């Protein structure tokens, strides 16, 4: 049956996980219900067993708490010195993570997994250190008490009355390859405590009063046993899945927990986590932003951020919704995500409030339909998800607003006074309402409320008889006032609420738009530097921070680019943090769990294939970390950037590959083309040489000279070919650098004619240089090469006795150099092609067909052009141009000064 | 073999080059000693005191520039650099560091012998301590005592810079003089990079002293390196 078969995706994932685990170290946790049950002892015993089996065991950090039995097990094991940290005048000794990573034993013992590190350590928590060890391939033995598990924190607090501060995510326990439950019945533990085997005597008494009560221990033991059992269960299921064992699949449950700034939200989160684990369901933690009566304090916002972080660390997906009605937002989101259960806090506020303003809980329950609602009790106070409003731009209400509000009332009182003789009082009240509405649409709540009160007062004072007093004759007017006030109040609230929501929507819109702009701009740009610059600009603008993008060099060390406008410089320490984020593909630094002491936050740029680099973000207000929500947004920015950069990398790589292929092709063509051309002169040289060697005596002086002449000439020929081949390859590979200096064309011509002096006997060379040739910026050697190639070409194709003309003139901003011959000319259809590589004329006397291609390459590199014209009188003329864009250097006056 | 024949030290690691040079030099009556690497070469210069050193730039143990610099710390023995074509930059550096001249592979025996002759001539002049008072190549005559320049018998007026450029070139006659060297000697060390000065003044000199400036007889341009003043031979 098809549905009995395991899902291939799930299987693949498990295989991948297994493979990943195989490269990583193995984690074994000695798990106990309470301190003193003998976890450390059991761990050391197991370590000894390993050591005796011949493994390299190092005690990285073990707390013996002065327990004698434990101490005695330690001797004989290699101990790693601890790192000493100075913190607020106290010396703390911590795990020396780097030393341990360098030492790289097979197995490291690290006691007390839930420990929180000193502030200067790399990680906040010891379990993060342990994960780094595992990633480095080191096996780890460690110990853990049940009360330190995040999801059990509140249960433990409930049972024992002790609030545990050092907690670790449940996922750490799930990561363990092996868990050994170290169990001791409570009575035995208490006995040990009495005997001083757990704590030294004076501490023992205190501990027994507080924590080590039989009831506590029983409860903790049960928790530990249950947690271990749950894990066994999960392993069993994983095994079954792998083996394709049919079982009852849980229905696809999804849990939504509604949280706010209230500290009791923590309980809701933990309950949700437990329920999710029990049901093997996904879960979401949701907070709703809505306009509220009371503006949330900074404290509230921090609290909420912490709750969101907690939920995330427990494995929840965290979501922030915003909307006008909490219940509607919640339910519609829950439906959109197919949530099956909603967990919400029980309200504790007085009932009349619900009557008056409506109850969120009631609305949720009524509107829930098929979704189950779980209402969880808080210990005290309200648990109702308190909507959180974000501070919105115009926070500080300034004096101007208050004055405006008074002014508005005065203005509308004036209008009402003008209308008074012609209209009824009801109409005047309407005028005031209009004024209040306008006030509310522009100003804050305080001033609006003031305007409302003032309006009622002014209405009374100015228009209600007796006039110009606050006394009221007719009781009926009180109704008018009440209605007027209520209507004004409601209008002002509604108006304000609409504005508030619009503001938040605008913020969200801005961020989405910013992300959209970023991705659009990134899509249109090529090249790493420009992409980085764009990303940095966007990040710094949207999050008002400074940003820097670091990419690794060939050794994998991050190198920051040159600092620009929006970036900041990194010192050694910050660079270390960035490097960590890069290597571990996790965020680090300010606001993150790892190395939070850093000045900036570092997010890895993770693309499809690899980690591209790291983006560092320094908040505008240096010490204010990014909020979790901002970090999420930053991460989406980082993702966009990573993808764009990866695209650039891939493009560069394929460019390089293409170049390599082209170079390869060129080399092959060169080899095949040149081998023939090389062999001809070589054959002549070898022939002449061997003849001289063997039949020296038979040859007369003239013949001998003839042969020697052949050797010399053919060698020169060979040299020319090799020179051209080398030049061509160097030109193609970009190895030739144009070394521009001010040159005199006359001198270059002089050098060429001097070098080729012997070759013009048969073809007289005429040189016609115009008198006004300026100095030109060019590479002397290369231009000489061009002239030589052109002249050699002309010599090769010209009939004996005809002239070759070398001329140079200035035209506009160019120097034109022409070599004209009286040879056969170039067929028009060939006039483009002859500048290509390996193309030679029909009567070519040898040569690789590279001469003109080299000329073309050199001239182009100088920004000039080269072409050939057939001359009316026969023959052809090769012309190349060199630009003289720069103003030639003026030196005359300077030189005269030196003279005197 | 008599001792009055000049002793030449060849520092070159390629056997076939040594073979060719050995044959052609000995046939011309020079005495030849050989070194296969820089270190050996330096020792032999100190112990054998050759008249001329032929130094290949591409040695296995140290580069030719280093050898030149070490030698110039204590001796003025002429050094002729032998370089391959792609060692243009090293060549100029070695010349600036005090090498006297260069040959680019492949070169002919005639070229080699000419360079050695020039070096020996300069050496002899240096040892005698006498500066020539009059340079005369037939068409061009320079009387240093009178600061007079004659072309085909007619006096040519030169500016002070042109004249001092001419004297430096004639002092190093037939040897290459690098751009930097010329600029330093004529304009002073501050102008060592301003080749355009040279271009302009060399053009003026050619204009005044050459029959056809585009086919110079005296003032030869060595592209990328410097100038060589060719005396009659």
Image (cartoon, coloured by chain):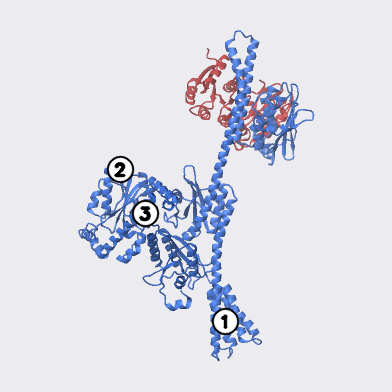
Chain colours: A blue, B red
Which quadrant does the C terminus of chain B fall into?
top right
- Say few, some or many: other residues with alpha carbon within 10 Å of mark 1 (under 14 / 14 to 19 / 20 or more): many
Instruction: Give how far apart the Cα atoms at labels 3 and 2 are.
Output: 32 Å
- Marked residue chain, label 2: A
- Marked residue chain, label 3: A
Residue A728 versus residue B218: which sits nearer the camera? A728
Residue A544 in the image: x percent, y percent? Answer: 53, 59
Residue A482 in the image: x percent, y percent? Answer: 53, 84
Q: Which mark is residue A496?
A: none
Residue B25 in the image: x percent, y percent? Answer: 56, 17
The residue pinned by badge 1 equals: A455
The residue pinned by badge 2 equals: A55
Left or right: residue A817 compared with residue A145: right
Q: Residue at x 60, y 51 (%)?
A: A524
Q: Is residue B82 above or below residue A397?
A: above
Left or right: residue A793 compared with residue A180: right
The residue pinned by badge 3 equals: A237
Q: Is residue A784 visible?
A: no
Q: Which label lies toward us, 3 or 1?
A: 3
Marks 3,2: beta carbons within 8 A: no
Residue A44 versus residue A760: which sits nearer the camera? A44
For marks 3 and 1, the one nearer the N-term is 3
Instruction: Give how far apart the Cα atoms at labels 3 and 1 are.
Output: 71 Å
């Amino acid at each position: 049956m098809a549905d009995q078969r395991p899902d291939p995706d799930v299987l693949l994932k498990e295989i991948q996980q297994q493979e990943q685990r195989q490269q990583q170290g193995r984690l074994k946790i000695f798990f106990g219900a309470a301190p003193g049950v003998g976890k450390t002892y059991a761990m050391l015993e197991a370590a000894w067993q390993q050591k005796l089996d011949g493994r390299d065991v190092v005690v990285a950090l073990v707390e013996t708490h002065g327990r004698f039995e434990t101490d005695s097990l330690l001797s004989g094991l290699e101990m790693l010195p601890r790192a000493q940290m100075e913190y607020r005048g106290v010396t703390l000794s911590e795990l020396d993570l780097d030393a341990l990573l360098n030492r790289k034993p097979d197995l490291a013992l690290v006691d007390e997994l839930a420990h929180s590190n000193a502030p200067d350590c790399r990680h906040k928590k010891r379990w993060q250190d342990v994960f780094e060890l595992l990633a480095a391939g080191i096996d780890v033995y460690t110990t853990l008490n049940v009360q330190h598990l995040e999801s059990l924190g509140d249960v433990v607090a409930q049972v024992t009355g002790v609030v545990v501060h050092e907690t670790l995510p449940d996922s750490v326990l799930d990561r363990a390859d092996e868990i050994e439950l170290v169990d001791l019945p409570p009575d035995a533990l208490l006995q040990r405590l009495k005997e001083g085997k757990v704590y030294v005597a004076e501490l023992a008494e205190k501990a027994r009063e507080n924590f080590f009560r039989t009831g506590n221990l029983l409860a903790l033991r049960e928790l530990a046993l249950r947690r271990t059992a749950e894990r066994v269960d999960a392993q069993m299921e994983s095994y079954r899945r792998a083996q394709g064992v049919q079982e009852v699949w849980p229905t696809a449950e999804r849990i939504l927990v509604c949280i706010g700034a209230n500290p009791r939200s923590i309980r809701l989160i933990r309950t949700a986590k437990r329920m999710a684990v029990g049901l093997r369901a996904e879960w979401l933690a949701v907070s709703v932003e809505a306009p509220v009566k009371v503006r949330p304090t900074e404290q509230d916002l921090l609290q909420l951020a912490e709750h969101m972080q907690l939920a995330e660390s427990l494995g929840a997906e965290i979501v922030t919704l915003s909307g006008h009605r909490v219940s509607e937002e919640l339910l519609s989101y829950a439906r959109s995500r197919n949530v099956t259960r909603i967990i919400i806090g029980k309200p504790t506020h007085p009932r009349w409030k619900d009557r008056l303003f409506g109850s969120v809980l009631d609305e949720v329950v009524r509107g829930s339909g098929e979704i189950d609602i779980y209402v969880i009790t808080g210990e005290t106070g309200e648990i109702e998800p308190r909507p959180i409003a974000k501070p919105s731009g115009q926070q500080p209400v300034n004096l101007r607003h208050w004055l405006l509000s008074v002014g508005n009332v005065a203005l509308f009182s004036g209008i009402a006074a003008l209308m008074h003789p012609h209209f009824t009082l009801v109409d005047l009240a309407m005028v005031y309402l209009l004024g209040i509405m306008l006030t509310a649409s522009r100003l804050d709540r305080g001033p609006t409320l003031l305007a409302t009160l003032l309006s009622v007062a002014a209405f009374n004072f100015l228009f209600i008889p007796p006039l110009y007093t606050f006394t009221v004759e007719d009781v009926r007017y009180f109704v008018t006032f009440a209605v007027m006030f209520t209507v004004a109040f409601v209008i002002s609230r509604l108006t304000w609420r609409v504005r508030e929501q619009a503001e938040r929507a605008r913020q969200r819109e801005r961020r989405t738009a910013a992300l959209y702009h970023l991705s659009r701009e990134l899509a249109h740009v090529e090249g790493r530097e420009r992409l980085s610059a764009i990303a940095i600009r966007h990040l710094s603008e949207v999050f008002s921070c400074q940003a820097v993008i670091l990419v690794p060099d060939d050794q994998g060390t991050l190198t920051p680019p040159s600092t620009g406008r929006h970036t900041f410089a990194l010192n050694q320490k910050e660079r270390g943090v960035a490097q960590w984020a890069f290597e571990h593909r996790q965020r680090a630094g300010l606001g993150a769990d790892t190395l939070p002491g850093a000045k900036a936050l570092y997010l890895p740029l993770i693309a499809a294939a690899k980690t591209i680099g790291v983006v560092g973000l320094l908040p505008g207000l240096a010490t204010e970390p990014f909020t979790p929500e901002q970090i999420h947004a930053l991460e989406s920015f980082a993702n966009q950037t990573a993808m764009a950069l990866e695209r650039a990398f891939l493009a560069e790589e394929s460019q390089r590959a293409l170049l390599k292929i082209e170079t390869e092709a060129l080399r092959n063509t060169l080899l095949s083309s040149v081998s023939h051309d090389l062999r001809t002169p070589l054959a002549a040289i070898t022939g002449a040489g061997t003849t001289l060697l063997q039949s020296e005596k038979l040859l007369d002086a003239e013949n001998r000279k003839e042969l020697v002449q052949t050797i010399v000439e053919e060698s020169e020929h060979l040299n020319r070919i090799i020179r051209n081949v080398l030049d061509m390859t160097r030109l193609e590979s970009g190895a030739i650098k144009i070394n521009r200096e001010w040159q005199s064309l006359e001198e270059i011509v002089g050098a060429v004619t001097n070098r080729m002096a012997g070759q013009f006997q048969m073809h007289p060379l005429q040189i016609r240089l115009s008198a006004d040739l300026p100095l030109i910026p060019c590479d002397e050697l290369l231009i000489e090469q061009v002239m030589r190639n052109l002249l050699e070409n002309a010599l090769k194709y010209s009939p004996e006795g005809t002239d070759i003309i070398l001329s140079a003139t200035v035209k506009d901003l160019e120097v034109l150099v022409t070599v004209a011959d009286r040879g056969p000319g170039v067929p028009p259809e060939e006039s483009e092609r002859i500048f290509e590589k390996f193309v030679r004329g029909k009567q070519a006397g040898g040569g690789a067909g590279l001469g003109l291609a080299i000329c073309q390459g050199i001239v182009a590199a100088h920004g000039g052009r080269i072409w050939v014209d057939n001359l009316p009188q026969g023959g052809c003329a090769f012309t190349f141009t060199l630009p003289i864009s720069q103003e030639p250097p003026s030196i005359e006056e300077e030189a005269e000064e030196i003279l005197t | 073999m008599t001792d009055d024949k000049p002793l030449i030290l060849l520092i070159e690691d390629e056997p076939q080059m040594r073979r060719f040079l050995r044959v052609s030099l000995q046939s011309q009556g020079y005495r030849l000693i050989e070194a296969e690497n820089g270190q050996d070469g330096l020792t032999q210069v100190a112990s054998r005191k050759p008249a001329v050193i032929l130094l290949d730039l591409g040695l296995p143990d140290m580069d030719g520039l280093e050898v030149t610099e070490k030698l110039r710390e204590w001796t003025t023995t002429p050094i002729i650099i032998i370089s391959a074509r792609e060692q243009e930059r090293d060549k100029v550096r070695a010349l600036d560091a005090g090498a006297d001249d260069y040959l680019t592979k492949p070169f002919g025996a005639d070229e080699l012998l000419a360079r050695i002759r020039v070096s020996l001539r300069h050496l002899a002049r240096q040892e005698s301590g006498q500066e020539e008072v009059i340079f005369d190549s037939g068409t061009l005559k320079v009387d240093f005592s009178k600061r007079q320049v004659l072309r085909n018998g007619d006096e040519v007026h030169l500016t002070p810079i042109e004249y001092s450029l001419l004297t430096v070139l004639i002092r190093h006659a037939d040897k290459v003089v690098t751009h930097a060297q010329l600029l330093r000697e004529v304009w002073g060390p501050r102008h060592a990079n301003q080749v355009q000065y040279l271009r302009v003044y060399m053009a003026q000199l050619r204009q005044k002293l050459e029959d056809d400036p585009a086919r110079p007889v005296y003032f030869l341009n060595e592209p990328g390196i410097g100038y060589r003043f060719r005396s009659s031979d």
